[in-house]
Image: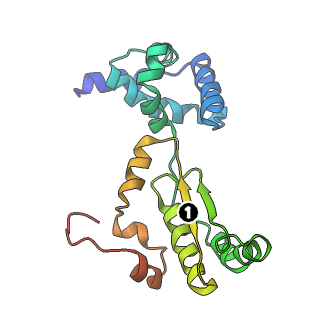
Amino acid sequence: MPDSIKDHFTRIELSTRDFRRLASFIHEKLGIKVPDFKRSMVESRLRKRLAALEMTSYTEYCDHLFSGQGMDQEIFEFTDVITTNKTDFFREPHHFSYLLEKALPDLVRRTGAGQTRKLKAWSCACSRGDEPYTLAMVLSEFGKKAGPFDFSILATDISTRMLATAVKGIYEESVIDPVPLDYRKKYLLKSRDRDKS
């Protein structure tokens, strides 16, 4: 993209009216609150969409997004650029310790979950899959100690781009740093292709 066009897109500003329309929509449809101080974040993330669609203002973009055609064509792109996909393996490690030491033993004792009936877990904002993969490792380890343990994990996210990454299950080596070494040996494979993770 020529510098003159880039300069044009960096000068376009998101009006208060358009920001409020977008923030309201994001909250209603995606369940994400976007306070006023995040206006510049929304503006910078949507700037790429304006450039890709060759639009000259955020108002034009909003009109397109909120039209029937825009909802069909643009909603997935919009969702992908507007969401922050923060995730890590063993994110909040104390949660997984609590799960292993307290929650799972209590569930098995009280309800037979995993033993007399399948334990079903839902990772509702799985992003690129780090957290449901962590949960799968933890539940597998628990099952090795607790005896037969049947579980399933449903991993969902509003970003189709992140879900596509999660389905592949391919990660850069630096991303798996939080995974304990014994878990790495049991549950992860290293790619033979040096250009891949």
- The percent coordinates of residue 37 (x first, y second) are 63, 35
- x and y percent of residue 155 in the render? 53, 54
Mark 1 secondary-structure assignment: strand
* Residue 192 visible from this viewpoint: yes
Task: Pick the quarter of the image with the C terminus.
Answer: bottom left
Identify the amino acid type marked 1: Ser
Residue 51, quarter of picture:
top left
Which residue sits at x=49%, y=14%? 68
- On the question of residue 7 being in view, the answer is no
Quarter of image, res 147:
bottom right
Residue denoted by label 1: 152
Q: Label 1 crowding class (10 Å Cα cut-off): few <14, some 14-19, many 20+?
A: few
Where is residue 179? Give x, y as percent.
48, 75
Colouring rule applied to residues: rainbow
Q: Quadrant of the N terminus?
A: top left
Q: Nearer the viewer, residue 82 or 17?
A: 82
As drawn, 13 above or below 104: above
Residue drawn 66% across the image and 37% down it: 33
